[in-house]
Image (cartoon, grey):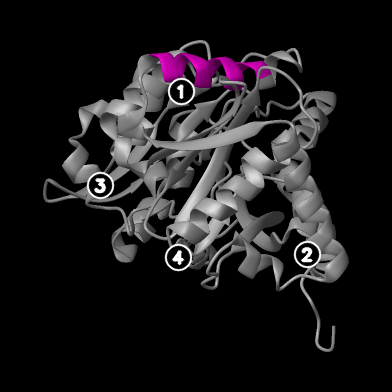
Amino acid sequence: MSLTLLTQLADLPASQWDALLPDDQPFLRHAFLSTLEESGSLGKGTGWQPEHLVWEEQGVIRAALPGYRKSHSMGEYVFDHAWADACQRAGLPYYPKWLAAVPFSPVTGARLLGDSAFAAKLLHHVPDFLHQRQLHSAHINFGDAQTRELVAAEARWLPRLGCQYHWRNPGYRDFQDFLDTLMSRKRKQIRKERELVASQGFTFEWLAGHQLSEAHWDFVYACYANTYAVRGQRPYLTRLFFSMLAEKMPQAIRVVLATQNGLAVAMAFSLMDGETLYGRYWGCLEEFNRLHFETCFYQGMDYAIAHGLKRFDAGAQGEHKLVRGFEPVITESWHYLRHEGLFEAVADYLNQERPGVQAWALEARASLPYRRDGE
């Protein structure tokens, strides 16, 4: 038995990696993760160096933990910048660190892949891996219930909570059926927003991966990159990423284009599996009143209803989602800090932070627009 390090996923056949996955969520598939690497979105110069952990017994891969050596904390959506700053002030190294996560995407899912007994063995050897590779910490972001169970059996992993907002479809017949569940004032607000977008002459078209041409991808990337340019940042993903992903897993890709007077001006890029639509990237070439809400939220809700999807995960943060029916969902991450002083300080901080996150998620439910009994 042994722990093996993979510095590029292409070294492992897709069939072996995908056989470890517990479901059809697209983000951990070999096609998605290898495309990030092969497109140059990860690797040299990005601060994300692939270092996937694989557990083998008798020459057979039994478990895996996709991970990355990090020289910064950008693109993670579980924010530890304050911890890094504190280390810098104290003269302690914080980077490089090691992160198990889906790069640039705050999506909850499996992290320890494969049979749980073998995954537990892999996790038990992570501290030795950190020591051997001179890494100061390990972080597992947005893990699922099985991840929680396995991590809880190990020492020194500190749990951290976060909050996202997801929309659930109990089986609505159409968007009006959803609106009928809302309080009158909230129902009118959403109708007004949608009517305002329609009055500006916008139409919307949904395309699957196999329907998108290179010209489409040029437009998608221009919109995506513009969301970073307006903040003075470089985009995480390369243009090549989108073309390569369309070749490898077109069945999972959905793009909605917003068109005005025959010209596309905005888009939202999503991935999907059998139950969930995952809204990932949005962008526009011009600003229009309420177009963001229509393209990123209402269009996705419409699509989920029409295709019988149970859930719409529209990404991180965004308290403005509450009044549009997106419910608060607690997310989890875990953190292994080798330095004793840092471990104690962060443990104390998280013990104080955790009740606040739980209280906010409970309080946020009061802002949901759904009708109460008697209303």
Marks 2 and 1, how far apart in space?
A: 34 Å
Quadrant containing the C terminus in the rendered view: bottom right
Which is nearer the N-term, disc 1 or disc 3?
3
Residue for badge 4: 146
Marks 4 and 2, how far apart in space?
A: 22 Å
Residue for badge 2: 361
Secondary structure under tag 1 reads strand
Secondary structure under tag 4 reads helix
Residue drawn at the location 84% of the way across and 89% of the way down: 374
Residue for badge 3: 18
Marks 1 and 3, how far apart in space?
A: 21 Å
Marks 3 and 4, how far apart in space?
A: 18 Å
Picture quarter containing residue 34? top left
Residue type highlighted by circle 3: Asp
Marks 2 and 3, how far apart in space?
A: 34 Å
Residue drawn at the location 75% of the way across and 16% of the way down: 230
Residue type highlighted by circle 2: Ala
Residue type highlighted by circle 1: Gln
Marks 4 and 1, how far apart in space?
A: 26 Å
**Residue 267 is inside the magenta segment:** no
Crowding at dot 2, Cα within 10 Å, few <14 / some 14-19 / many 20+, comes out as some
Which span of residues is magenta-colored? 215-226
Secondary structure under tag 2 reads helix
**Would residue 219 be seen by someone viewing this image from the given angle?**
yes
Q: Give the x, y percent position of residue 267.
A: 57, 29
**Residue 217 is inside the magenta segment:** yes
Image side of residue 233 versus residue 211, left or right: right
Secondary structure under tag 3 reads helix
Residue for badge 1: 49
